[in-house]
Image: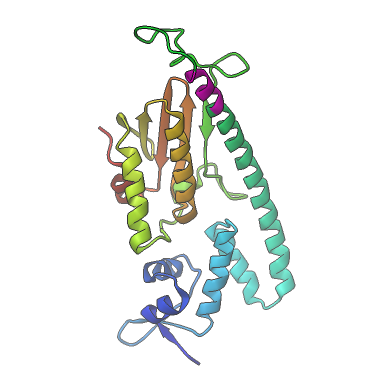
Amino acid sequence: MRTYRISQLAERSGVPATTLRFYEDAELLAADRTPTGYRVYGEDAVERLAFISSAKLLGLALEEIRELLDVREEGVCASVRARMLTLVADRIQDTDGRIAELRAFTAHLAGVHAELSGPAPAGACGPDCGCTTASTAAGGPVPVTLSPTRPASGSGTEPWRDAPVACTLGGAELGERTEQWRTLVARAGRREEIDGGLRLSFPPDAELAGQLAALATAEQGCCAFFDFTLHLTPASLQLSVRAPQSAAGMLADLFGVPA
């Protein structure tokens, strides 16, 4: 039976070696050890990694993927399909809820944009200029909270606290994502510490809010341990970012440290 060293498996599967080590720690992928301590993976590792990657594309949490792998080990495809049906149905429900949030967020941005597009009063800002009192069709200022992170079925209310810390981006992609965050974060006027992370305050800019929301959603696809909350009112725009204690270094690297 053929075996692979970690570098060979990374090249064959396209999964970075750092992620392979993380999968081993997360009990998703088994590895033996040579007498000299090198990791050695079995012939089935490539197919197993393909299954893991496919499950991640469905938005499944690591504990759900681990459960599916256990079912898959039994060798009965019907059992795997039955469990996947339930998990995919849960993701559909989560996605529908997220779409509703994004639509509400877009509608609110459109309302703010429409009010701010009108003629500005002469002189300085005042209580009726629209910069701090822009309203929705309902007639009052409405804060909008966008939370890309949703707990998996059956998990606690704050799954990010115990989430495994791993990023699936590597090389040039990781550098590009880091630069994207630093470009936006540089526009923050204030950083303050919160429980588990920090809060960034920005000018109430509708276009910037959309950029932050899009980047936070993309980040969730590769670093699911981050928890983002975007809070927009006509008077303020705040992004709260939280992560497990073990990801404090990455949090500081991407988003800076509180002032």
The residue sitting at the front extreme is 119
| Quarter of the rendering occupied by the C terminus | top left
Q: Which residues are magenta?
A: 110-117
Residue 50 appears left or right of 225: right
Q: Quadrant of residue 120?
A: top left
Residue found 45% across the figure and 33% down from its top: 207
**Above/below status of 126 relative to 247:** above
**Above/below status of 200 relative to 152:** above
Q: How is the image coloured?
A: rainbow
The residue sitting at the left extreme is 259
**Above/below status of 219 relative to 45:** above
In front of the other: 136 or 40: 136
Residue 12 appears left or right of 124: right
Residue 39 locus on image (x, y percent): 38, 80
Residue 78 locus on image (x, y percent): 74, 71
Please name the predominant secondary structure of the magenta segment in the image: helix
Residue 153 locus on image (x, y percent): 62, 50
The verdict on residue 115 being magenta is yes
Residue 85 appears left or right of 105: right
Residue 215 locus on image (x, y percent): 44, 45
Residue found 40% across the figure and 40% down from its top: 241
**Above/below status of 55 relative to 259:** below
